[in-house]
Image (cartoon, rainbow, N blue to C red):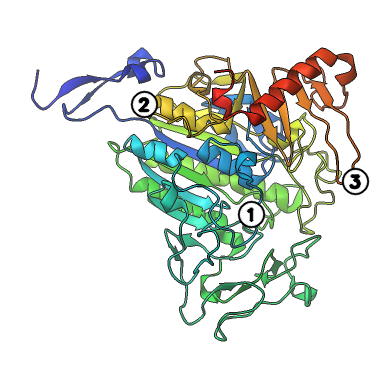
Amino acid sequence: MSSTCCIVVMKKLFSSIVTSSSLIILAPCSSAVVKPNVVIIYGDDVGYGDVGVNGSKMILTPNIDKLAAEGLNFTDGHCSAATCTPSRFSMLTGVHGFRNGVRILPPNAPLSIPLDKITLPRVFKQAGYKTAIIGKWHLGIGEKGKKVNWNGDVKPGPIEVGFDYSFLLPSTNDRVPCVYVENHRVVNLDPNDPISIGKKPEDERSTIYPDGKKDPEAMTYYRSSHGHNNSIINGIGRIGYMCGGKSALWDDETMADVFVDQAKKYISAQKADQPFFLFFASQDIHVPRAPHKRFQGKTKLGYRGDAMVQFDWSVGEVVKALETAGLRENTIIIFSSDNGPVYDDGYKDGTTVRTSTKDSDSGHDGSGPYRGGKYQILEGGTRVPFIVSWPKGIKPGESAAMMNQIDFLASFASMLDVKLEENEAIDSRNTLNALLGKTEQGLPYMLEEAGMTALRKGDWKFIPGKTNKKGKQSGDRLFDLSKDLEENVNVAKDHPKIVEELRALHNGLKKSKGVRFYNK
């Protein structure tokens, strides 16, 4: 056999993943088989029914639909929570947000991810991957009890929890600070116009932005419907007050272009023999929806529908970048969303309802056949688009397996032979075979979170009763999703034994030291 070349056979780990025709490649004897790159494309507030492959007729999503046609579309795929911060936290840590008290974070919140725990990017780094995040973060930055220095090193953040490179929308686009952060520094910041986050500027040199409560007329893009009326930046009211940083302000209408350009730069710099993990976290279609003018008017659904068309374009551009770099065949792309849909979420941008499943009276249903959306414990809150594509290793099709993003960590740890300690990723289970289409056997049960928790077990959905602040007790709810996708008919009284069985399982999972250890 040649001293410079030998036949390298993929580990048994991968032999169960790819077809026999792709198991053997030629490579230098000193090299290992190149592991698949992994790209997670994450939408924001994108509902199950907001994409064409899941039934959308009024919003066209050809790039997402093509990804689904070339991959595996999961019809029972979930994020772990019906709001963004706990959902992202769970995906990156493998731990349910409620265990750590993680909720939607305000501006200037400290980092919510423990620095000493395993994370999804750390799993990939341990396996020899380069790691990057581009887009929305909203998991906090800085140390608890200390004020973030936006004019110096902005940390700890993504770099400290396992990402080699980050280009961030640090909080979310309806909150201050309205600047990009690359690694540890605010992009394009003028030191003579320092940033402060609070009600008053810390430096007399700082630019002072209009206060939406005192000067609502300054909200020229569109007005706030509730809660988004502090600092007005780019004619849009935000949550929280910001002073300074005028040269560093983002342009809402070019944000998608900026993130796509950063993703293209990152992908084009990668090499075929060096695997990478990229978390591309779009701001679309979160409020304030301000799609680029070339997308405005593309739907009859106003800014929300147009922002979804823009997001579909972003997906297509990321895929094209992989193709141009010659990396598409050996890249696993996961497309999903952090929670279900929402309409009027703080701005008068053309939608007229808050968390209904209907976009005004247009007929578009962002949750598809399900009821509920963002903030809600109903299926529409966590059942989201969930597509996995890997030309080299996944046969296209559709899967009914019940899946959850919280399980990415344990699944990729299994694929990459990374050992998890007992105190790490305690709620993440290995669903790799289902993720890659080797079986339709998904999760036997799972918790769903939306300020409270519910349980899915097969077609049963159990929502425990609770006592409100006034002491009023609501009853248990039980739905049979095989007959009632919209969760309209509470059958708890008809199945008392099932209610008690599911209550015991629900309570046991919540009180356990972790879902992956339950019953062990």
Q: Of the numbered discs in the image, which one, if any, rests on residue 470? A: 3
Does residue 444 appear left or right of residue 134 in this picture?
Answer: right
With respect to residue 422, does 184 lie above or below? below
Q: Residues within 10 Å of mark 1 (few under 14, many from 20)?
A: some
Which of these two is toward me, 169 or 350? 169
Q: Residue at x 63, y 80 (%)?
A: 208
Identity, as a three-letter code, of the amino acid under mark 1: Leu
Instruction: Report whether residue 66 is seen.
Output: no
- x and y, in percent, of residue 508 in the image: 67, 25
Identity, as a three-letter code, of the amino acid under mark 3: Lys
User: In whole angstroms, how far apart are the C-alphas of marks 1 and 3?
Assistant: 26 Å
User: In whole angstroms, how far apart are the C-alphas of marks 2 and 1?
Assistant: 34 Å
- x and y, in percent, of residue 102 in the image: 63, 46
Does residue 40 appear left or right of residue 304 in this picture?
Answer: left
User: In whole angstroms, how far apart are the C-alphas of marks 3 and 2?
Assistant: 51 Å
- x and y, in percent, of residue 192 in the image: 48, 82
Q: Residues within 10 Å of mark 2 (few under 14, many from 20)?
A: few
Q: Which residue is mark 2?
A: 417
